[in-house]
């Protein structure tokens, strides 16, 4: 199952109003490392569906949100809780490294 | 057990896989979990790989190579090698997920990893303005000032690519001439957005939450200057990825894996190396592909000379001797 897409228009409702921690994967079509990390994120989401939701935001189609969160490098993954960024992970990493970065949300 | 395990999935690894697979050796390719496809996954247009007169996108080229290897029976695993034991007749390869694979031969084609400047703030600001990948991050610097550090082909390629987005691209180089090819130099020098900053080394990266500028030191007179910018792209070369084989494979003074003459043979029998990890000089996709061919043929030749009872334990057809 691949992650749900969020947009500039739905960001408020889908992410900022989320009652559970939610991670946004900022990505783009042309970004090779984004393509690499995407299936790993899907897997992490699948294995932890009760703890952490993971959604994707295409930075080309949604420049407003990308700019608001100061994205200068993708893939960039930000965990939101209560509408605030509580964790940022930058760059494609192997699954164990990402799980270690996200440990507090997966426990 | 396998006859061949190939570590790496750039042009060298995939080309070795195509040859080994076509020889019915059922190679297993350990492609890495996030760096699969190698360096070309981070490039855009590749104009110098033969057979593509209109150019081809780097990631597309790598996906084609992968499909070509799979077509002949190569199996690809998207994981990272964490441990290698290469000395014995049977080699073992341990992966990040805990799986251990055995093989009679290993082709080591792990390429190289970007070099860092070695500055204190470089890691802290990585992803916040410091980048090693213009094609990944360039679009976030629309109408901004950025700098590329370096003087080789990849530095000029990055600089030229960045002019699509940035207003000004400084090319900071520690000498007063470039190593880059004539074609790349001509293109960059004709570009009004690229400004050459000669004889300067980056000594500081400034910025609290994101990059705001750099401090430069003149390599001739030692004078210091600063440059205001939002992005710093580092393209000062790459080091061969050899950490997994330290203490097992001999290295050259340049840090690449030592191979015998024009072959891919390392100091350990049954272990072959190919691509940028053995090449301190040329480092092209096409030379890496050629090097992958050499490794696959060397491995085939080695396998053909092994005792039948050993080969019978491995998957795939018995290897046929190829001319050395």
Image (cartoon, rainbow, N blue to C red):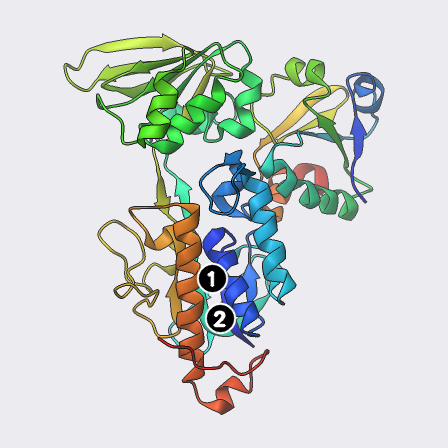
Residue B227 in percent (x, y) is at: 36, 9
Q: Residue B22 appears in which quarter of the rendering?
A: bottom right
B3 sits to left or right of A46: left
Q: How many marks?
A: 2
Frontmost residue, B22 versus B172: B22
Frontmost residue, B128 versus B155: B155
Q: Secondary structure at mark 1?
A: strand
> In the image, which disc is placed on residue B92?
2
**Is residue B8 placed above or below A12 in the rendered structure?**
below
Q: Secondary structure at mark 2?
A: strand
Q: Is residue B23 visible?
A: yes
Q: CA distance from mark 1 to mark 2?
A: 8 Å
Residue projecting furthest to the front: B53
Find disc 1 in the rendering and name its residue.
B83
Q: In this rendering, do the residues under marks 1 and 2 share a single chain? A: yes
B266 sits to left or right of B47: left
Q: At x 81% / y 42%, what residue is drawn?
A: A49
Residue B283 in percent (x, y) is at: 36, 46
B105 sits to left or right of B32: left
**Quadrant (top left/top right/bottom left/bottom right) for the N terminus of chain A:** top right
Q: At x 55% / y 87%, what residue is drawn?
A: B312
> In the image, which disc is placed on residue B226?
none
Residue B41 in percent (x, y) is at: 54, 41
**Quadrant (top left/top right/bottom left/bottom right) for the C terminus of chain A:** top right
Q: At x 54% / y 63%, what residue is drawn?
A: B18
Chain of the residue under label 2: B
Residue A79 in percent (x, y) is at: 69, 29
């Amino acid at each position: 199952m691949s992650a749900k897409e969020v947009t500039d228009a739905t960001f408020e409702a889908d992410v900022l109003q989320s009652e559970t921690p939610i991670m946004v994967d900022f990505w783009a079509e042309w970004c090779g490392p984004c393509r690499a990390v995407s299936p790993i994120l899907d897997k992490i989401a699948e294995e932890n569906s009760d703890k952490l939701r993971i959604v994707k935001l295409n930075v080309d189609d949604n420049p407003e949100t990308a700019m608001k969160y100061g994205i200068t490098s993708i893939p960039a993954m930000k965990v939101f809780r209560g509408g605030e960024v509580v964790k940022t992970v930058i760059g494609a990493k192997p699954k164990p490294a990402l799980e270690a970065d996200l440990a507090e949300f997966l426990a | 057990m396998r006859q061949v395990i190939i570590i790496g999935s750039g042009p060298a690894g995939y080309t070795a896989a195509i040859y080994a697979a076509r020889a019915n050796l059922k190679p297993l390719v350990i492609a890495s979990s996030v760096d699969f496809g190698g360096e070309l996954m981070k490039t855009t247009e590749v104009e110098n790989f033969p057979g593509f007169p209109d150019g081809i996108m780097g990631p597309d080229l790598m996906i084609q190579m992968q499909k070509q290897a799979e077509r002949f029976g190569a199996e690809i695993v998207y994981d990272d090698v964490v441990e290698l034991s290469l000395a014995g007749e049977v080699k073992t390869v341990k992966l990040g997920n805990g799986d251990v694979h055995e093989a009679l031969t290993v082709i080591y084609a792990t390429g190289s990893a970007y070099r860092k400047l070695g500055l204190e703030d470089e890691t802290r600001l990585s992803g916040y303005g410091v980048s090693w990948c213009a094609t990944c991050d360039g679009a976030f610097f629309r109408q901004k000032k950025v700098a590329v550090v370096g003087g080789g082909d990849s530095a000029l390629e990055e600089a030229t690519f960045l002019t699509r987005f940035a207003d000004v691209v400084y090319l900071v180089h520690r000498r007063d001439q470039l190593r880059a090819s004539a074609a790349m130099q001509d293109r960059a020098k004709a570009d009004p957005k690229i400004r050459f900053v000669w004889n300067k080394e980056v000594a500081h990266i400034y910025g609290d939450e994101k990059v705001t500028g750099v401090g430069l030191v003149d390599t001739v007179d030692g004078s210091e200057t600063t440059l205001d910018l939002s992005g710093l792209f580092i393209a000062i070369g790459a080091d061969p990825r050899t950490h997994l084989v330290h203490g097992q494979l001999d290295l050259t003074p340049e840090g690449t894996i030592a191979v015998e003459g024009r072959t891919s043979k390392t100091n350990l029998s049954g272990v072959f190396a190919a691509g940028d990890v053995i090449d301190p000089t040329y480092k092209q996709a096409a030379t890496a592909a050629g090097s992958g061919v050499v490794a696959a043929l060397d491995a085939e030749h080695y396998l053909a000379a092994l005792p039948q009872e050993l080969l019978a334990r491995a998957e795939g057809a018995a290897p046929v001797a190829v001319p050395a």
